[in-house]
């Protein structure tokens, strides 16, 4: 059995490896194909735009009688991705939740949050297929070999397998307890959660307004990484792009660094060891992360400032936490009367969404074309 490095030594090795790759990227800037890089970023932006539109459709199904703007949902989506690419621990999800909720009059956090889940159904299916492909190509390290990677977070978890199992079990127990508590104490909460999933009750609408856009988004993302691989001289191909997707799936599960940067860098160097020189792959692993992070952060910050009138991401997070606290206090204020106004309002929202879905099906059955926005 290989000897295990102390945590401090593992962190130091990981940080050193990352900054060596950063140095390689900046020393090799002249060799970057800038046109391919710009085209890749444009496709990545299109990917996020299509996803935001699918998210908008899920929200419209949940709130059929409320008027709100897609551009604000788009801005919230970009702001979240941009923040997550520069700050660890996925704080961008708080930003997206708050900015989206504040863009829909009368909306509630449980409904908006559950609408996030709609797009994850398709993404999870594609993600599983991508990982199956990646692990069958002979170049992707198996989970036990993650302990040998030069990324302290994933290598530490892989080396201390019992700790990893404990953390997974703990999270599962917390989830079950939270579910049980909310099931007993918060009937209105679950009504609103179901409201956010309304579009799933109309299969044809879900396929037309969500799944179809996600297919286009994945194709745009595929094109983005193809051009990014070309830009940094690794070489775009179907296999290489799918391997990058596999790396992103693993890195996304370890949110201890911005965008899973350390994990991505370590895995990409390992995966593309036979496709290009180590220096080229190291420059790509960091270069594409820096390019995507800078692009999404700038666009996201622009949306925060010009669409939502906040001066920084920090202001958005503080406002979001205050808003969530205020809504929780409001919910607790009516908790003793589940048959009162609060429950009635939530039921009416769900009823409106269900009525809209039934009207759509009746119009379709009668041959009348429904109006699309």
Image (tube, rainbow, N blue to C red):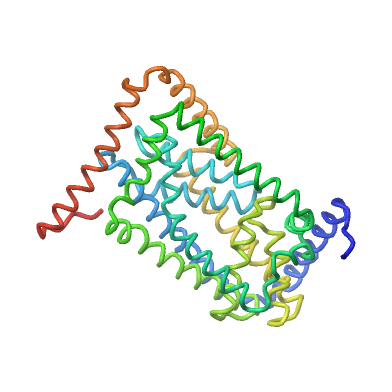
Indicate the position of residue 27 as horizontal and vertical percent values: 76, 71
Indicate the position of residue 276 as horizontal and vertical percent values: 71, 81
Indicate the position of residue 198 as horizontal and vertical percent values: 32, 46
Residue that appears at 44% across and 56% down: 121
Q: Is residue 35 visible?
A: no
Horizontal arrangement in the rendering, residue 366 relative to residue 345 (left or right): left
Residue that appears at 27% across and 32% down: 348
Q: Is residue 206 above or below residue 33?
A: above
Horizontal arrangement in the rendering, residue 128 relative to residue 197 (left or right): right
Residue that appears at 48% across and 26% down: 328
Horizontal arrangement in the rendering, residue 203 relative to residue 359 (left or right): right
Q: Is residue 14 visible?
A: yes
Residue that appears at 72% across and 51% down: 164
| Front in this rendered view, residue 327 or 250 | 250
> Which quadrant, please, contains the N terminus?
bottom right
Q: Is residue 309 above or below residue 364?
A: above
């Amino acid at each position: 059995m290989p000897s295990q490095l102390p945590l401090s030594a593992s962190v130091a090795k990981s940080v050193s490896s990352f900054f060596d790759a950063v140095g390689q990227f900046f020393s090799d800037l002249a060799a970057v194909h800038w046109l391919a890089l710009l085209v890749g970023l444009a496709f990545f932006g299109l990917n996020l735009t299509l996803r935001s539109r699918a998210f908008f459709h899920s929200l419209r199904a949940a709130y059929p009688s409320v008027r709100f703007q897609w551009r604000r949902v788009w801005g919230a989506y970009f702001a979240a991705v941009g923040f997550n690419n520069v700050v660890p621990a996925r704080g961008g999800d708080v930003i997206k939740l708050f900015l989206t909720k504040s863009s829909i009059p009368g909306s509630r956090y449980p409904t908006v949050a559950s609408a996030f889940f709609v797009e994850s159904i398709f993404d999870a299916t594609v993600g599983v297929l991508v990982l199956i492909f990646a692990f069958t190509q002979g170049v992707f390290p198996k989970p036990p070999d993650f302990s040998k990677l030069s990324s302290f977070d994933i290598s530490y978890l892989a080396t201390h397998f019992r700790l990893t199992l404990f953390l997974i079990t703990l999270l599962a127990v917390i989830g079950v307890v939270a579910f049980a508590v909310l099931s007993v104490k918060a009937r209105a909460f679950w009504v609103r959660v179901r409201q956010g999933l309304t579009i799933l009750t109309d299969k044809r609408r879900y396929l037309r307004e969500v799944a179809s856009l996600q297919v286009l988004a994945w194709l745009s993302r595929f094109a983005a990484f193809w051009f990014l691989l070309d830009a940094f001289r690794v070489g775009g191909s179907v296999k290489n792009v799918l391997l990058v997707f596999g790396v992103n799936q693993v890195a996304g599960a370890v949110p201890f660094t911005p965008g899973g940067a350390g994990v991505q860098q370590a895995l990409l160097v390992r995966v593309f060891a036979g496709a290009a020189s180590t220096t080229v792959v190291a420059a790509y692993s960091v270069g594409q992360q820096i390019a995507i992070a800078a692009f999404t952060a700038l666009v996201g910050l622009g949306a925060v400032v010009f669409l939502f009138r906040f001066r920084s991401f920090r202001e958005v997070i503080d406002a979001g936490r205050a808003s969530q606290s205020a809504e929780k206090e409001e919910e607790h204020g009516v908790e003793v009367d589940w048959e009162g106004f609060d429950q009635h309002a939530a039921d009416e929202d769900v009823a409106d969404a269900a009525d809209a879905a039934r009207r759509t099906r009746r119009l379709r059955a009668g041959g009348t074309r429904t109006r699309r926005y």
